[in-house]
Image: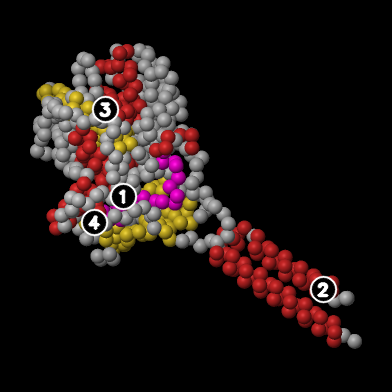
Amino acid sequence: MKQAGPVRKAFAAILAAVITVCTFPGAAVKVRAAGTVSPGVAVHTKAEIASFLASHPTSLDEVATYAVTPSLAEPYSAGKLSAASQQSALNMFNLMRYIAGLSSNVGISAKKTEYAEAAALVNYLGNTLTHTPTRPPELSDPKYNDLFNKGYEGAGNSNIAYAYAWGDPLPAELNSMIPNGWFADEDKYNYNILGHRRWFLNPFLKTTGFGICTGDAVIIIDGEEIIEHRFQSAVYVQGEPGTNGGDESFYNGWGGMTVPWPAQVMPTEYFRANFPWSLSLDEYVNSASVRLVRRADNRTWNFSDEAADGDFFAGESLRYYGSPDCVIFRPEGLESIKDGDIFDVTVSMTLTNGREKTVAYTVEFFSLENYMVSNPPSTTDPPVTSDPPVTSDPPVTSDPPVTSDPPVTSDPPVTSDPPVTSDPPVTSDPPVTTDPPVTTDPPVTSDPPATEEPPVTDDTGTETEKSPPETPADDTSDTEPAPSGGGTTETDGTTGSTPTRHPDENTQQHSGDASTGASKDPGSGKGGLSTAAIVIIAVIAAAAVAAAVITVIILRRRANNKP
């Protein structure tokens, strides 16, 4: 009995040590090893991609036509694309999403189309590219209040682009703008955000709308009159106007899915060597590193905040542009991408909740054109994902010729987007000016009072791509006036943010879920012990119990041996 005290003390000390190991927070975190995961999107084969294109015909060089030509003089009115051109543009849009492994059944909304058409007209009349257009003098009459308000809201929720040329007229090549303009985002105003691309890759997008406006203007250069051909376009990439994103908001939660571009099986026709690579995320990143390896020669590019073999962006500045977060990298010295090139990509991240995550995948490039020549897709093969009919746009019986935009032999460059990397502030209604009352629809998730008018004095195109209303980012790139000079194409940077409602000007669109802006952190950890942790704890507990038993036996023997 005299020895019971020491024995109990020894056992209690061992038990306390076991409990400490099991409950010490640091111990649980250390044993949670980060696993490597795949992106989690569908991976389509070459044959499936070819079959999808065959059943959803579209081409890069297709010239868009009008069902209704926009009126660029009194009475002013927006144009309307022919049903055939709308469907072809939609097929290109869905083809890109199919390649990315996302839903490829986005349809056309009549309301979004109307707002995109008005946006193209308003920016055309203002001869600018911005998600927050000021009211053009041509629309100063109160009878144009509705037209301007729709154009203002449409510009703030769309990916927009502008092109101009002297001499031969510009062809209205909306289709080529999708992969080579907005998805590319390789210009100096967009490569560090990729807002346009990320808006197009919103997994929850259900409907869209297309609008263009083309025409000619006389400009004076060195005392000489020159005809300048202009092309404005808009693709509505947020929820229905006035719905604040609704069920199309990118905030819905992706279930851990990530979206890489270029995709894991990627046609070379839609991705060039100078285009940035990206991984759109549903989780918020504190820091990241990337390893890119080309299998043909084992050439390796490494990217991190400390050093990078090319351009590299990750972290807070990339949030809310069509996806909660993103990692962007562009390898330097990559002069070409060829049919058959294969790259291995590993993206390692530390999330804002302290959790580690690694995403690894392979990108295989191939020529879709060559593949379809060698392997003609069966016309009887149904698309893997079907596109619902364009319910909002009834078939047009005849498409009048685009008198203001005849086809030309050369395509103007479409790869450069004017600075639109941020969405315009949407947290407050713009000041009311002396213009006649206009119901203002600034880039916000809700419709502002009808008596106010969007800012007329500020045409800087500040756009915050999906940045939360609490911290809208300025985006002056979309607001630069259209340059008057040789042929070029500009996409406005990035269109809004959920709160700011500017899809990147290239795509700076804000998918109106402003209320969940900066505070949302889908990457927040779920806690709990991993299997490895449980095993380790069990082993420690067993060892502790064994030690306790041995100690008790030794102490009892000593007690028995005493006289």
Front-most of residues 102 and 268: 102
Q: Position of residue 104 (x, y in %)?
A: 30, 45
Q: Residues within 10 Å of mark 4 (few under 14, many from 20)?
A: many
Q: Which residue is mark 1?
A: 100
- Whichever of labels 4 and 2 marks the residue nearer the N terminus, that label is 2
Q: Which residue is mark 4?
A: 46
Quadrant containing the N terminus is bottom right
Front-most of residues 502 and 54: 54
Q: Amino acid at mark 1?
A: Ala
Residue at x-position 33% and y-position 46%: 103
Q: Are marks 4 and 2 in contact (CB under 8 Å)?
A: no
- Whichever of labels 1 and 2 marks the residue nearer the N terminus, that label is 2
Q: Are marks 1 and 3 in contact (CB under 8 Å)?
A: no
The magenta span reads 249-269
Q: Is 474 placed left or right of 99 in the picture?
A: right
Q: Secondary structure at mark 4?
A: helix
Q: Which residue is mark 2?
A: 6
Q: Amino acid at mark 4?
A: Lys
Residue at x-position 28% and y-position 19%: 136
Distance Cα–Cα, label 1 vs label 4: 13 Å
Q: Amino acid at mark 2?
A: Pro
Q: Residues within 10 Å of mark 2 (few under 14, many from 20)?
A: few
Q: Position of residue 158 (x, y in %)?
A: 32, 33
Q: Which residue is mark 3?
A: 117
Q: Amino acid at mark 3?
A: Glu
Q: Position of residue 29 (x, y in %)?
A: 57, 59
Distance Cα–Cα, label 3 vs label 2: 87 Å
The quarter of the displayed image where residue 201 is located: top left
